[in-house]
Amino acid sequence: MPRPHGFAYTDHANGSVDITHHNRHATTLNGDRAARFLTEVTTSPDPQLVMARWTGNYQHGNERTARNHPRNRR
C-alpha cells in the first residue's frame, strides 16, 4: 500500500483545525476532536498517516482484496 502524502493542517486560534490534501480542503475539526488530533499528530512518527486516517482518505485493508476478486477483474 502506498504511503499517504500531500496532507497539511492549519491550527487556528479559535481552536479549530483545517486539514487539506494537495491544497484542497479535506475536513475541519473543532473542540475536543481538534485537541485529540493535535495530540496525535504531534506525537506520531508518521503525521501523514494520522491526517489520512482522520480525513478518511486512506486505503482500507479490504480494498486490495476486492480489487483481486474475479468479479472485479477486467
Image: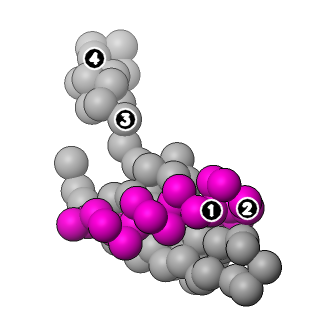
Mark 1 — residue?
Answer: 34
User: Label 3 amino acid?
Assistant: His
Nearer-the-camera pick, 50 or 62: 50
Nearer-the-camera pick, 35 or 51: 35
For image coordinates 72% across by 71% down, the residue present is: 16
The image quadrant of residue 5 is bottom left
Say few, some or many: other residues with alpha carbon within 10 Å of mark 4 (under 14 / 14 to 19 / 20 or more).
Answer: few
Q: Earlier in the sequence, mark 3 or mark 2?
A: 2
Q: Secondary structure at mark 1?
A: helix
> Which mark identifies residue 30?
2
> Which mark identifies residue 61?
none
User: Label 1 amino acid?
Assistant: Ala
Q: CA distance from mark 1 to mark 4?
A: 38 Å
Q: CA distance from mark 4 to mark 2?
A: 40 Å
Mark 4 — residue?
Answer: 69
Establish if 16 lies above or below 36. Answer: below
Q: Position of residue 64 (x, y in %)?
A: 27, 31
Say few, some or many: other residues with alpha carbon within 10 Å of mark 2 (under 14 / 14 to 19 / 20 or more).
Answer: some
> Which mark identifies residue 60?
3
Q: Which residues are magenta?
A: 26-48
Q: CA distance from mark 3 to mark 2?
A: 25 Å
User: Label 2 amino acid?
Assistant: Asn
Q: CA distance from mark 4 to mark 3?
A: 15 Å
